[in-house]
Amino acid sequence: MDQAVDFQAIPRVVAGRARGGRETQQDDMVCLHDAREEAFLLVLADGMGGDGAGELASAGVVEVARRLWDAGQWREQPGPLFLESLCQDAHAELHRRRAGLASGEPHSTVVAMMVHRGRVSWAHVGDSRLYRFQGSQLLGRTEDHSLAQLRLQQGQITESELATHPDQHKLLRGLGGPEAPVVEHGCAVLRAGQTYVLCSDGIWEQLSTEELARLSRRRDQQDALREALVLAVERGGQEGDNVALIFARPAEGWWRRYGDRLRWALRRAAPGGRRVAASYNEASS
């Protein structure tokens, strides 16, 4: 059981993964940031397919995400359109990678989040998840594309039974299959005090929603991330899954930047600039 953690970090975002009880690491992720536009792209993929195809698949999703980000399409496209392109291009990339394999079929889940111009967009295929929290309150989470989630929606099982149900790993959608994936989307206005969690099923099967909420808003993000990964690996035991996790608080920097711009505009617009700015500060505190 491997508790070694691979870390990534960009401003207001930390990410990590561990192999858990598996012989190979089939989870992959990438966190990208443009400081000038205060934009973020966070992508997490959980590969599968046997004979090394899982690692190849998740790496393919991450490679496509980097390529599209570097091409700059996100600067002009709406977030949902960019994320749809990412998922469909990643699906096509997995088909290309399959052609070079003697055996195995590269498939992957994906959950991706884009922050740009004060809006958050997300997309997912499979059972990797995104959670949104306002403080300790859960605002929502993505719904898995799995047979177990379907049973939950039909009232056959409860939320507490979802993580351990035999049908949990029977996915109804994924990247790399014979048909183009149906991608599920969501979006929201970026607000102060919100945290976002992206994770593979190796995390949410072992950690409760309450634990994720508590850890995601801890001041020391890297320490919280390490604790979450170690907990998931320990609880998974010798047969535990790979684990991958991203904690993000993108609104912290955006709201500070917005406030600075607004104060600057107020000073320029009013002859009594200092007095107006002071009144704004008092109202905002």
Image (spheres, rainbow, N blue to C red):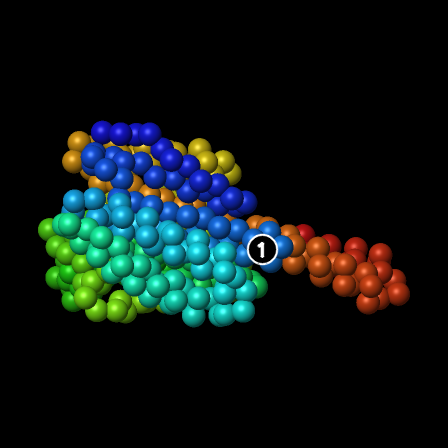
Residue at (22%, 40%) from the top-left corner? 241
**Crowd class of label 1 (few under 14; some 14 to 19; many from 20; radius 10 Å):** some
Q: Quadrant of the N terminus?
A: top left
Find disc 1 in the rendering and name its residue.
38
Instruction: List x then y, in percent, for residue 15.
Output: 42, 42
Residue 256 visible? The answer is yes
Query: Which residue of the protein is positioned furthest toward the right in this rendering?
Result: 271
Instruction: List x then y, in percent, for residue 226.
Output: 39, 34
Tell me the kind of residue under disc 1: Glu
Q: Is residue 87 left or right of residue 275?
A: left
Q: Is residue 211 left or right of residue 279?
A: left
Q: Is residue 71 above or below residue 13?
A: below
How many numbered dots are placed on residues in this image? 1
Instruction: List x then y, in percent, for residue 130.
Output: 36, 55
Q: Is residue 136 left or right of residue 165?
A: right
Residue at (15%, 60%) from the top-left corner? 147
Asked which secondary structure carries label 1, the reply is loop
Q: Is residue 30 left or right of residue 110?
A: right
